Image (cartoon, grey):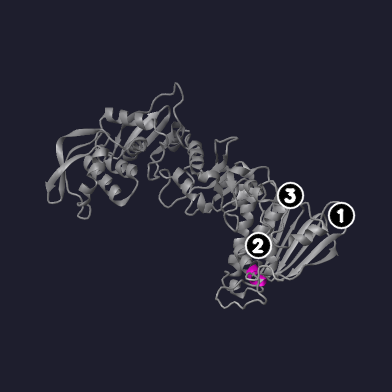
Amino acid sequence: MKLFPQLISEAPEEYGGRVRVLPPEVAHRIAAGEVIERPASAVKELVENALDAGASRVEIEIESGGVALIRVRDDGSGMSPEDAKKSVGRHATSKISSAEDLARVVSLGFRGEALHAISSVSALSLTTREAGADPATCVRVLAGGLPERSLAARPVGTTVEVRDLFMNLPVRRGFLGTERAETNAVATVVEALALSRPEAGFFLRADGRGLLALPASADLRERVAQVHGLSLARSLVPLDEVGGPVWGFVSPLSVSFPTRRYLHVAVNGRVVDTDSFAPAVAKAYADLLPKGRHPAAFLRLELGPGEVDVNVHPAKSAVRLRGGRSAYPLVVGAIRGALAPEREEGGAGPAAEGESELRPIGQFAGRCILAEVGEELIILDQHGVHERILYEKLLKNVRGTPANLPVPAVVRPPVDLAPEVWNFEVELEALGFRLEPFGGGAVRLLAAPESVADPEGGFLGALEALAGGEDLAKALACRGSTKFGESLTQEQMVSLLREWSATEFKEICPHGRPIAKRMSLPDLLREFGRI
């Protein structure tokens, strides 16, 4: 007698559709391709495993850019024979045991995919020994086949050897770069991991020659010196967030670079993609560096395990904060706080109590203000001084108080901007401009913000920024400041210098150009041979 005869078929029916379940060997190769994109990806996964094992010294050796050979040797805790064999299986890990553990991951690795993925596309051997065990265990896997275990000899720790990477994925090999490019990618990965763990030593050899020798260092600044040189390390400014969620070092305003090479971010000890934090760093320096220049920043975010979701990207290179919160305000605030005292060499901090005020001497060529304070001569870009004052005021409140012009000014915007005037009439009035049509595309300015020294320039700058979606405060400050060649009275110079001394970033204009040059009396006398 059959139970539920209508639900149970006597013989399997052949499926005639187009959707197929992939064979395991194909699925494994696809998964391996997601985790291991190039030799540098394999090196990253293997070194992270070594660090999770408590290694204090990690040695990496590669040949042919890592395609022919990757060997990672560590002095970590090692594994038992049983754990060693299981470790090359898919989703085999000692880091987590339940779905709830994903919310509080504290290790670098946790998915249990790395060794399985690498062994699926290479000839992998893993030799390991834990304390108290003798001899060591060696596990070998060829292109995703069954693991073979044997006895071996080595000290406590683990050595993973990967040969002929992507041996069964020739298409992936075709997309790799040159040997030199792949070697450089591996070196970049090792440098990044070394910066995240100064307390461990990292050593990289490529084709028999030493590329990196980074012994364990005392702190992050020392590790930066090892990787990027003593000069950069010495110049770095520490963030003021002592014991806070954000700490590290950034470059002073006098040091910048044409690329973002010197940007490094680690969240809870995990190296993350710098592109996700680059906008925050750029915002912190937005009005302080020249266009096209970038700072150095070595940032560390220390957050509770439950505050960070690391299960976002196959390569574990991105993180998400709980509740969708952004780390940007934390980063921007910490960097701004560190730069506020203007600790770069030659910067002028706020005047100490009892220090004499900056006194104007006069103008030079209608472009500079000469001033003195104590025994120091200061030459200031008068346009930059006013620009910095206006910019910081506008950042706090871009709305201006309109002041009637003694004589209304007729302004003729460029042909392409003339139609935009009345599209942004409300915004322009909110800034403090009062205007009316004058015919032929021109407008007559009746009032302008009282802080703007050049009403026509300020109006055109504001209009260009509104139409082009640019930084309104920067444009209005630039076009509304005193013009070159404009004569200033003694009272005007005194007022400008007083306001400029109270600005937060007085040494740099909003475009990143220097505002002041200084010469002490001893230096000046030395020029005349008096010292």
Tell me which secondary structure the magenta stretch mostly adopts: helix
The numbered disc on residue 133 is 1
The residue carrying mark 3 is 56
- Quarter of the view holding residue 315: bottom right
Residue 157 horizontal side relative to residue 297, left or right = right
- Of badges 3 and 2, nearer the viewer stands 2
| Residue 235 picture quarter | top right
Observer-nearest of 164 and 361 = 164
Between disc 3 and disc 2, whose residue precedes? 2
Measured from the top left, where is residue 150 in percent x and y?
A: 84, 66
Asked whether residue 515 appears in the rendered view, the answer is yes
Left or right: where 278 falls relative to 160: left
Q: Residue 299, how many percent across, how many down?
A: 56, 45
Secondary structure found at label 2: helix
Give the residue type that dot 3 points to: Ser
Q: Which residue is mark 2?
A: 42
Q: Estimate how packed mark 1 is, as few (under 14), some (14 to 19) or many (20 or more) residues with alpha carbons within 10 Å.
A: some
Up-down relation of residue 109 to residue 394 (above or below):
below
Query: Image quarter for residue 24?
Result: bottom right
- Give above or below for 334 relative to 311: above
